[in-house]
Image (tube, rainbow, N blue to C red):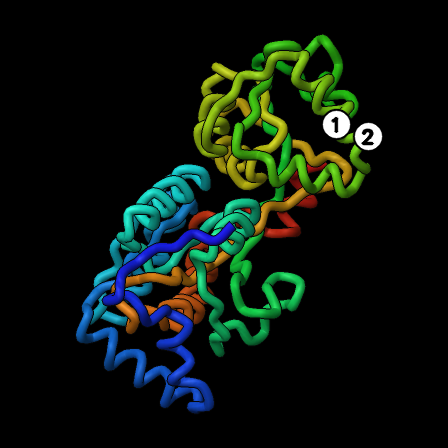
Amino acid sequence: MALATGSPALAQSAASALKKLAGLQTKEREQKLIEGAKKEGKVVVYSFTAVDQLKPLLEEFQKRYPFINPEHYRGNATGVFNKFTTEARAGRTLADVIDISAGETYTLWQMGLIDPYHSPSREGISKDFMDDKGFWTAHYHFVIALGFNTQHIKPAEAPKSYEELANPKWKERFSLDPADQDLFGALLLHWGKEKALSYFKNLAKLEPRMVSGHTQQANLVGAGEIHMAPWLYGYRPLQLKDEGAPVEALLFDPVLSNPAYLLLTKNSSHPQRSGAPDRLGPVARRWDEILRRKVRPYADQDRIKRALP
């Protein structure tokens, strides 16, 4: 379904603005984008990345480009999607760049609200992590893990598989996020339609508490208000454990991951900002270095292998 938005003033899409730079060498392209960005002075990012991770990215961005003020809206994936599409329907595309999960990315593409970008900063990223037509690039992945409160569930008793999670003894003792349709889709592809639908119907009979936001779920598990949550971003329970919370984590087989995609909006009223992915790419690599010291030790592969059986 295509969604018609914008006005004659917004006739130039982000892609058409970038097309004018095609063929330029990287440094010349960067200079042209910077010249235009200086005139506009800011970039607007809508993101579902947690605040404690998003803030270092924006701070690093402003250090690198002090003449650009990065403004942002932060919400969960559903919140970001709803805000952006509501504004688009009203003909007001305020966001220049969107950071969001896979399901919402696909829907925005179907609605015709994002433009392709073939930024030089995509070089070096695996082709499996980006769209070959340039509509999205995954700049990081979350490993999905079960997190549980050890004051309510002993490690030896915790479910070790998807099948054990469906045991009736866990009725009303765990939570799910209503926006986890991506993970449902992944298991549907892995197991097949019949097994996946049967599994989730059985899971629904256990009356899980529906909580929006993986960070919120993790915090509730840490506080003991929820006994466990099977689809947390894996670094969160490890982070809570290091902070002293009675939390442990486990990986199920198959291990799921949730990519975060960087998108370029189509009808931004600031076409010079269309180069934002070019600038965010190098910053994101520096961002990863920063987060490895602050947050990403919990997402490091060796740490995961040691901490998550």
Label 1 residue SS? helix
Marks 2/1: CA–CA distance: 5 Å
**Front-most of 37 and 224?**
37
- Please name the amino acid that badge 2 sits on: Glu
**Front-most of 252 and 33?**
33
Question: How far across and how far down the image is residue 89, in percent?
Answer: 34, 47
Image quarter of residue 9: bottom left
Is 216 rendered above or below residue 122? above
- Please name the amino acid that badge 1 sits on: Leu
Question: How far across and how far down the image is residue 228, in percent?
Answer: 59, 21
Residue 64 shows in this picture: no
Q: From the viewer's perspective, is 258 left or right of 92?
A: right
Residue drawn 59% across the image and 74% down it: 124
Q: Which mark is residue 197?
A: 1
Is mark 2 in CB contact (under 8 Å) with mark 1?
yes
Residue drawn 55% across the image and 76% down it: 123
Q: Residues within 10 Å of mark 1 (few under 14, many from 20)?
A: some
Q: Which mark is residue 194?
A: 2
Question: How far across and how far down the image is residue 245, in percent?
Answer: 48, 25
Residue drawn 30% across the image and 58% down it: 6
Is 184 rendered above or below residue 64? above
